[in-house]
Amino acid sequence: MIVFGVYFVRERTRAVESLLLTKARNLVLVGATTMEKLLSEAVKNGELTHDQLFDTDYQQITEGPLAYTDPPKFHTRYDRYFDEHFQEILDRFAMEDPSVVFAILADRNGYVPTHNQRYSQPLNGEEIHDRDNNRTKRIFDDPVGLKAVRFLGSDQQPVLRQIYERDTGEVMWDLSAPVMVDGQHWGAFRLGLLLAETEQSIIRMRETIFVSTLLMLLVSSLTIVLVVRRILQPLVSMTQSVEHLADGKIYQGFQMDSNDEIGKLIKAFNKMSSQLQQTTVSRDYYDCIVESMREAMMIISSEGLIKSANQSTCALLGYSCEELVDQPVEVILPSNWQKGAFNINDFSKPTLLMDKNDRGCFFLIAKSGKKIAVSLSSSPMLDDDGGVLSLIWVAQDITQRREMERRLQQAFEESWAMAENLEEQNLVLSKSQQKLEEAYAELKASQLIILQQEKMASVGLLAAGMAHEVNNPIGFINSNLNSLKKYLEKMLSFIEAQEKALNEFPDSEGKQEVAVLRKKLKLDFLLEDCRELIDESLNGAERVRNLVQNLKTFSRADQAEEAKVDLNDCLESTISIIWNELKYKVTLNRDYGELPLTLCYAQKMNQVFMNILVNAAHSIDKKGEITIKTRHEDDHIRIWITDTGCGIPEENLKKIFEPFYTTKEVGTGTGLGMSIAYEIIEQHQGKIYVTSEVGGGTTFMIDLPVAE
C-alpha cells in the first residue's frame, strides 16, 4: 500500500510537472520564434539597422523618472523601438496565464530593453514600489540571467529550464530559448513561472495520501488480527466492503454493529474512506486544471490506445470524450505518418513530433477527416526501470499561425522579387553610368590630345612664319656677302698691281712713305682677315639658311594634307630642331637605309619622331647613345629608335601609350606624348612596338606600310 501511494504521488506529480513544462516550453519556443521573425523583419524593412540591434553601448539614463536609480537604468539605440513594438506582445504572454510572472526579451549581456506592463511602471520615489514595479531597462547580470541569455540551445534541448527561489522564498521556473537574428545570436526570450499554487496542491495531495496509506496499513494489520479471531463472518463482511471500495464506491460506508476490534476496524475503515474522498477531490482539482487548458492533452497507453482526452482535444478534433477514449491512436494520425503498428517505445524521450512532408508542424485528423496543423509534443511517463508506461501528448492548434506565416512568406517573396528587380535596375544604371564615365574619360583625353595637336600645329605655323621672315634678310645678307667678297678680290688685284708698279720705280722718299704707311696700317693683315671674315659670315649665313629650311621641313605648313615624303628627311629635320636637347649628352648614330617615298602627314610624323627622341634623351642621365635605324622591308618602312637610357619597368610597358600616364615629375610632362604618337601611327595604318630592360635602354619600332 505504501509503495502504491508513493508511486501514485510520484506519477501524479510527474505528470503535472511534465504538463506544465511542456506548456511553458511551447510558450517559450513560440515567443522566441516570434521575436526572431519580428526582429529580422525590422532589420530587413529598415526600421532598425543591424548595428543598432546589436548595440551594446549602454548609456545610463540621466533624465526622467528612470534617472539615477539603484540599480541603474540604461538606454540603447533600440530600446524605444522595443517599447513601441514589443511591450504589447510581451503582455500577451504574461497576462493570459496567472502563473506567468514575467515574459521578457533580453540581449546576450542580460539587458532588458522593455518589460511587460507589470514591471514597467514609472518610478514614484517609494523604494518598495520602485523595486517591485519597474525592472525595465536594467542589466540582469546575475548567474541565472546570464546563463539564460547566453544559452544557444540544441535539437535535444531547445529550451533551458532553471529552478530557483525568489527573494520572497517562492520557487520559480525560469525558461529561456535563444533568439537568432540573421544567423547571429542576439539574446533570449525568457518566461518566469511561479509554482507556489502547484507546489501547495502537490504537498496537500502527498500529505493526504500519506495519512490515508498509514491508516490503510493500520486497518490491514487489525483486519489480519480480526480475521484470525473471527475467521468467517467478519472476514466475509470485510471482503465485501473492500470490494465495494475497489469498485469506487468510496462514499458507501461499512455498517456493522460491533464494539470489538472488528467494529473499531470498521470505524477506521470508514475514516479511511473519508480521507480517500478528500484525495479524490484533490485529483478532481488537477483534472479541472487539465480540462481548463487551452491546449489539447491526451494520455496514450502502452497499447497505443487513447486513455484520456481533455475538452480542448474534443473541441479540436470534433469527437466526444466517449468516442475518443479507448480508440487506437492511429484514428487521429495521418495514414502516411509511420510504417507498421504503433510502438510506444519509439517515444521513450521527450520530443516534438514533425510531419515527414512538412517539418514545421504535425497534422492530426479530425472526425470530419480534416487535417489540422498542430504543434505536438510527446512526453513519456516512465516506470522505475525506465520503461515507457504511457505518453502525454500536448497539441496546440497552429492553423492561424501557419496562415500568418504563409502570408509573411508571400510578402517576403514579393519583397524579395521587388528587391531583385531594383537590383537589376541599379545594375543597368550602374553599367550606363560606367559607360558614360568611360565615354567622358575618352572625350576628355581626345580633347586634350586635339589641344596638344593644335598647339603643335600652332608651333609649326609659328616656325614656318619665322622661317619665311628670316629667310628674306638671310638672302640679302648672303647675296651682299658674296658681292663684297667679289669686290674685295678686285681691290686686292688692284693693290697688287699698284704695288708691282711702284716696285718698278726707283727708291724715293714718297715710295718709302707709302711702305711705312702700309706697314703701319697693317694693310696685309687686314686684307687677309677680310677674306676670312667674309668666308665665316658666308658659312654662318648658310647655317642659318639650313636651319630655316629645316624649320620649314619640320613644320610642313605647306603640307597640311597627305603628301609623299622621305621619312629619312623627316628624321633629319626633327633632329636639327631638337639638336639642342641632344648635343650635350647624346652620341647620335644614324643607320639610314634607302626608303621609298610614302604618302603620309609629314608634320604629324615629325611630331612622333620628336616625342620619341626627346623621351630617349630624357631617359639618359649623363652620357649615352641614340641609334636611328631605317629599313624598307616587304613593302613596309620600319624605323628603330634605340637609346641606352634607364629603361622602363615591365609592369609599366602596357601603360606608356595610355593618355596622361607619365613617369616624369609633376609639371614636367603631360603624359600625352606617347598617346599622341600611338594615335598618329594608327592613323597611318601602322604599328608601334616597344621593348625595354631596366638599366639596359629602350627600343621603339615603328612599322608603316608604304602608301602610294
Image (cartoon, rainbow, N blue to C red):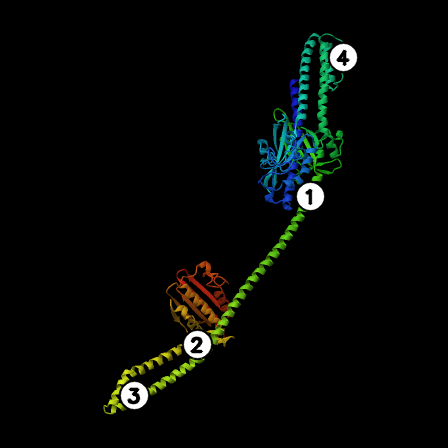
Q: Is residue 245 above or below residue 484?
A: above
Q: Residues within 10 Å of mark 1 (few under 14, many from 20)?
A: few
The one of 327 and 225 positioned closer to us in this rendering: 225
Q: Is residue 326 visible in the rendered structure shown here?
A: no
Q: Residues within 10 Å of mark 4 (few under 14, many from 20)?
A: few
The one of 164 and 272 positioned closer to us in this rendering: 164
Q: CA distance from mark 3 to mark 2?
A: 40 Å
- Helix, strand or loop at label 4? It is loop
Residue at 44% across, 69% down: 639
Q: Specify the farthest residue to the bottom.
A: 505
- Helix, strand or loop at label 2? It is helix
N-terminal of the two: label 4 or label 3?
4
Q: Nearer the viewer, mark 2 or mark 4?
A: 2
Q: Is residue 372 visible in the rendered structure shown here?
A: yes
Per the image, the residue denoted by label 2 is: 548
The one of 568 and 670 positioned closer to us in this rendering: 670
Q: Is residue 242 above or below residue 147?
A: above
Kindly identify which numbered label has been placed on residue 406.
1
Query: Which amino acid type is shown beneath numbered disc 3?
Result: Glu
Q: Are marks 4 and 3 in contact (CB under 8 Å)?
A: no
Per the image, the residue denoted by label 4 is: 255
Q: Nearer the viewer, mark 4 or mark 1?
A: 1
Percent from the top left, x then y, of residue 197?
68, 25
N-terminal of the two: label 4 or label 1?
4
The one of 47 and 679 positioned closer to us in this rendering: 47
Q: Is residue 313 left or right of residue 544?
A: right
Kindly identify which numbered label has been placed on residue 496.
3
Query: Which amino acid type is shown beneath numbered disc 4?
Result: Gln
N-terminal of the two: label 2 or label 4?
4
